Image: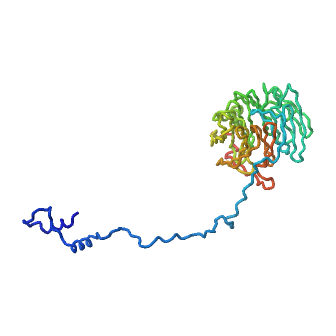
Amino acid sequence: MDFDYAFYMLTHQGSSTRKGKENPPRYGVGYRKQLAEAMNMNRSRILAFKNKTPPPVELFPSNFSSDKPTESNPPKARRRYISQSADRTLDAPDLIDDYYLNLLDWGSSNVLAIALANKVYLWDATDDSTWELATFEDERGPVTSVNWAIDGRQIAIGLNNSEVELWDTAASSHVITLRGCHLSGVGSLAWNNHILTTGGMDGRIVNNDVRIGSHIVVETYRGHEQEVCGLKWSASGQQLASGGNDNLLHIWDNRSYSRTRWLHRLQDHTAAVKALAWCPFQRNLLASGGGGNDDGCIKFWNTHTGACLNSVDTGSEVCALLWNMNERELLSAHGFSQNQLTLWKYPSMFRIAELTGHTSTVLYMAQSPNGCTVASAAHETLKLWNVFGDPKEVKPAPKADPEPFAYLNRIH
């Protein structure tokens, strides 16, 4: 790369007087300058910025907001306020602290039923009146479950001696007693029109037709090895979800060829499954909650296929679940250590709010007929929460997604 030496070799190749290439002649400054200009070697920098970069152009003024309401961009709905404290607290003496029982239910006539030891009390939320409906002997009690019929007039009461009684609350009179269905206490109940489904501590699930004076056993489901602590019929009345102390969740379908054989046997939970809630806006979507040994998981299921869609670790046992009938939200009741109610946004499962105030495990939850108010019970205390919105501002409930081929019993 020595241009002087190269030039010398090119112009003196034939000279015999050359003494050696190690001492080539040196040329003057003028020659070197011309050589550098010819080879474009006088540039000290390849890229040179002579002017500063102009400042960026502001496309929108600083006070511009794309959220300003226009015809094409209507104003956003006001965010719902959720109170962190209960609207009302009522005493519930002798309330049994038992995870496997179901002692609270809110009927369609806006009357709340709660079982306290051997008695069942009713509270009318419309006029704030309270009265005792029934009292049972110690040999038959305590009461282990209560559940309203769809008409909001009849109520089923499960007892520890395996019997179930039906009462007419309008007349405060006993209607019928169901005997012989179970070998021990009846901890869970669920209505499907005129069919009353009972879940026993013996693991049996029995469908009873109660339209006539004496009940008729329609079906008996056998699949749980321990007590049944959760029962819920879907809104369509076609599928029944049952949870047990054996950590099993069963889906039963009354359209299947073998009606007493489970459609799905789901074994993902590692603790008792009590909390069950069918989604009001999406068919075949079931939420289930497990006990403390399950890490407090809430699982979501496609009950048509049996697939687990999602599992969320809440950190504490899940005792009850309720869907918001007007928004895509889910409310869960928990135990140790915060004993809170947690409101989740579905399907992101973002925690919207946590409601605290109970001093022990929130074992029971029920929802008012308008879907706005929630009652929670724990350790002789009943609290009312306006967690799902103001009744005056409630939107119509979203319609359930249509189920394809709903008119077919089964697709093979």
Q: Is residue 306 left or right of residue 125?
A: left
In the rendered image, the vertical position of residue 101 relative to residue 353, given as above or below = above
Q: Please give left or right for residue 186 compared with residue 62 in the image.
A: right
Residue 384 in view: yes
Task: Choose between 389 and 238: the one closer to the eye.
Answer: 389
Horizontal and vertical percent for residue 333?
73, 41
The location of residue 193, given as percent across then percent down, is 80, 40
* Image quadrant in which you'd find residue 164: top right
Q: Does 6 sit above or below residue 226?
A: below
Q: Quadrant of the N terminus?
A: bottom left
Residue 309, image x, y percentages: 63, 43
Q: Is residue 77 above or below residue 214?
A: below
Residue at point 22%, 75% (across, down): 30
Judge by depth and name the residue closer to the eye, 324 or 209. Answer: 324
Instruction: Give x and y (percent) for residue 254.
Output: 72, 36
Q: Is residue 195 visible?
A: no
How many numbered tags mark residues here? Answer: 0
**Quadrant containing the C terminus in the rendered view:** top right
